[in-house]
Amino acid sequence: MLLGGNPSRMSDIVTLLLAIAHADGHFHQAEEVLVRRISLELGLDDRHFQSCKATFEAGRGRSGGGASSQTSISRAYKVLGVEPTATDAEVKSAYRNLAKEYHPDVLQSKGLPSDFMEFAKQKMATVNDAWSVVKQNRGL
């Protein structure tokens, strides 16, 4: 099986579904309900869904558009898939796991299509941005 029940790939599918839902420039409540339901059917919990949503929004350059830095910090934690109360070690571990998962060499060795490689490149940029925000916030 291509996806093999891999939670990271399932999260990628949800993130891509969010992109499709936003294609018309609006994200309607019914679309969110549907994508959230699909996320649950794929075996992901609400934390994973929120991480996918934050990753998509950050990847679209939605840093809050004038919102407070607290909003971007909150989104950064969601992108990394950890709570703001996580220890420094937990946050670093979450970042390292995501960086390893989306590293171009690792993905290329799996023979994934070029379209997915572009998606992964964008996801890695979003993860790196989130890590920078969290690092700065924590003084790491």
Image: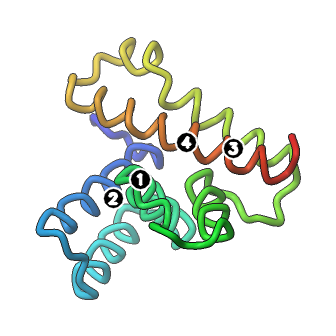
Identified by mark 2, the residue type is: Val
Left/right placement of residue 7 relative to residue 137 reads left
Q: Residues within 10 Å of mark 3 (few under 14, many from 20)?
A: some
Front: mark 1 or 4: 4
Q: Earlier in the sequence, mark 1 or mark 3?
A: 1
Picture coordinates of residue 100 (x, y %)? 58, 27
Q: CA distance from mark 3 to mark 4?
A: 10 Å
Q: Earlier in the sequence, mark 3 or mark 4?
A: 3
Q: Looking at the picture, does residue 126 appear above or below residue 61?
A: above
Q: CA distance from mark 1 to mark 3?
A: 15 Å
Q: Which mark is residue 11?
A: 1
Identified by mark 3, the residue type is: Ala
Front: mark 2 or 4: 4
Left/right placement of residue 100 relative to residue 116 reads right
Is 2 or 120 nearer to us in this picture? 120
Residue that appears at 48% across and 34% down = 124
Picture coordinates of residue 49 (x, y %)? 46, 66
The residue beneath circle 2 is: 14
The residue beneath circle 4 is: 127
Identified by mark 1, the residue type is: Ser
The residue beneath circle 3 is: 94
Q: CA distance from mark 2 to mark 1?
A: 5 Å
Q: Looking at the picture, does residue 61 appear above or below residue 119?
A: below
Residue occupying the far left of the picture: 24
Picture coordinates of residue 5 (x, y %)? 40, 47
